[in-house]
Amino acid sequence: MAAAGIKDATAVVGIGQTAFARHLPEDERTLACRAVLAALDDAGIAPAEVDALASYTMEETDEVELAKAVGFGDLTWFGRIGYGGGGSCATVAQLAAAIAAGQARVGVAWRSRKRGSGARPWTDTVRQLPTPAQWTRPFGLLRPVDEIAMLTRRYLHEYGATRDHLFNVALACRNRANQNPDAIMYDRPLTREMYMTSRWISEPLCLFDNCLETDGALACVVVGAERARDCRRTPVLIHAAAQGLPAQHHGMVNYWNDDPLTGPAWTAARHLWKHADLTPEDVDVAQIYDAFTALVPLSLEGYGFCGRGEGGAFTEQGALETGGRLPINTGGGGLSEAYVHGFNLITEGVRQLRGTSTAQVPGASTCLVTAGEGVPTSALLLRRGD
Amino acid sequence: MTLLTPVTDPEGAPFWEHARAGRLHIQACADCGTFRFPPRPCCPHCQSFAREWREVSGHGRIWSYVVPHPPLLPDYAAQAPYNVIVVELADAPRIRLVGNLVARAGARLDSVAPERLRIGARVRVVFDPAGLPQWVLERS
């Protein structure tokens, strides 16, 4: 038998969040404190018991500020994972690894962000995004949407996928948001006509292919599986976890290797499934990082739900909707609930396995959660723990 | 109108120096000969730190393209919608350069109608007065 590893050794036992809005009056630090305390309360664990923290870059709140505000105990394990939205699931993965290895007992991961009322990162021409900017920005490839639109155009060209496939992604997310009172787009239905006639942002991506701009904060609490049985809620086991930074990968401008249309998802997926007792066919519901619609067909291929180039076709016939082959982003995702660098996908994955989602997949017992495709990424395979 | 100029680094600087002289050079390993882009300190194939800059023909094909619309930085918004293309070089198929398809050297980013862009179209390099590589259609 192989080393015990992290399989089912830890669980998410608490989740918490603030409201989501275009503008929240409180600052990031206050929002982070509220989300973290809500998650600990959900778990029934006192702040003084927390000894590990994990966060990911583009986070405005640091460990010292958070710890002294909410009253954590002595912290003996803390880390920050790089690459923004690619690091969301890696926070939980690294807490799971630390707890499974005996280096920590109670871990908290969080995201607090005011991207709704704050500046757009790409407008800063001095502090640039982690892309090799000298090769792209002078030519007007300025924003993440431009970088992903370039890969999208090539994807549509090579595989014959269409804008209708991208619309299927946007629609599934919006339909789930319309069931979720916490979602920014709760009362805003989307139609195909609205999508097809909306303004371009970077052709071939239109307004509805882009995520929201949101203020909000979220957190979750991870403990060992044994301790989890004594917590308030149904434990959600971390069955497998992975990060992925492929050989010769270039971030969102992945134009410079043999095969730009396979990205970090493929690398993370190989590790994830290798360490899991489950296959893609066993996944009841998925929360797939959706900063842009086009990341979803890429991720469907990368994580093995369909073959290469089949990600567009996979979305047909309501496959991503409730009752479809693979319901996704059941809280509305980054496209329609809130864009908080994917942390809401983790909390929604936990809700599905507790049976408390606003778009509950009946009997869901396994959930894949992914972080940003197109940058060094991460993923979690969660399993209902009772 | 001032567009962003390349904020370069020691590895990238030779590319821009050659471009200012009107030549397209790509970094290559001086031991195993493999082209690499973007430039970096050593060769990912043979780990050699010996490197050279090799001139390429400047012919290629459009691999993909986008047409950005506002919100954009002001000087780019003033030309939007414009095109940004990725060109796959004829003499080094895995080397792909980001650039703009323009009507002639030094022309604006929006000087070619977006409808004329096609994946696979043959293009060749030209240089604007500041030495920034641009691309024109082989058959226009």
Image: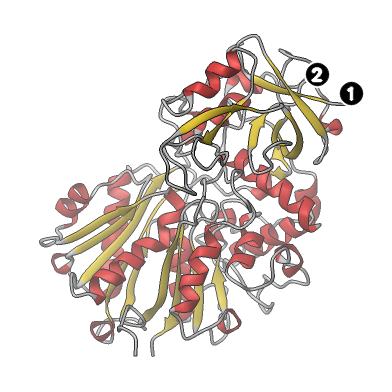
Spatial CA distance of label 1 from label 2 is 8 Å
The 10 Å Cα crowd at callout 1, few under 14, some 14 to 19, many 20 or more, is few
Tag 2 secondary structure: loop
Question: Residue A211: which disc?
Answer: none
Q: Position of residue B24 (x, y in %)?
A: 64, 23
- Say if mark 1 contacts mark 2, CB within 8 Å: yes
**Circle nearer the N terminus (1, 2):** 2
Q: A345 and B76: which one is in front?
A: B76
Q: Residue visible at 84% across and 26% down?
A: B138
The amino acid pointed to by label 2 is Ala
The 10 Å Cα crowd at callout 2, few under 14, some 14 to 19, many 20 or more, is some
Q: A20 and A244: which one is in front?
A: A244
Q: A304 and A41: which one is in front?
A: A304
Task: Specify the quadrant that holds the N terminus of chain A.
Answer: bottom left
The amino acid pointed to by label 1 is Ser
Q: Chain of mark 1?
A: B
Q: Chain of mark 2?
A: B
Question: Residue B103: which disc?
Answer: 2
Q: Position of residue A84 (x, y in %)?
A: 42, 49
Tag 1 secondary structure: loop
Q: Residue visible at 73% across and 46% down?
A: A153
Report the coloring of the rendering: secondary structure
Residue B105 is left or right of residue B130, and the answer is right
Q: Residue visible at 59% across and 43% down?
A: A256
Q: Residue visible at 18% across and 56% down?
A: A70
Q: Position of residue A166 (x, y in %)?
A: 72, 56
Q: Is residue A147 visible?
A: yes
- In the picture of the structure, the residue carrying the numbered disc 1 is B140
Extreme right residue here? Answer: B140
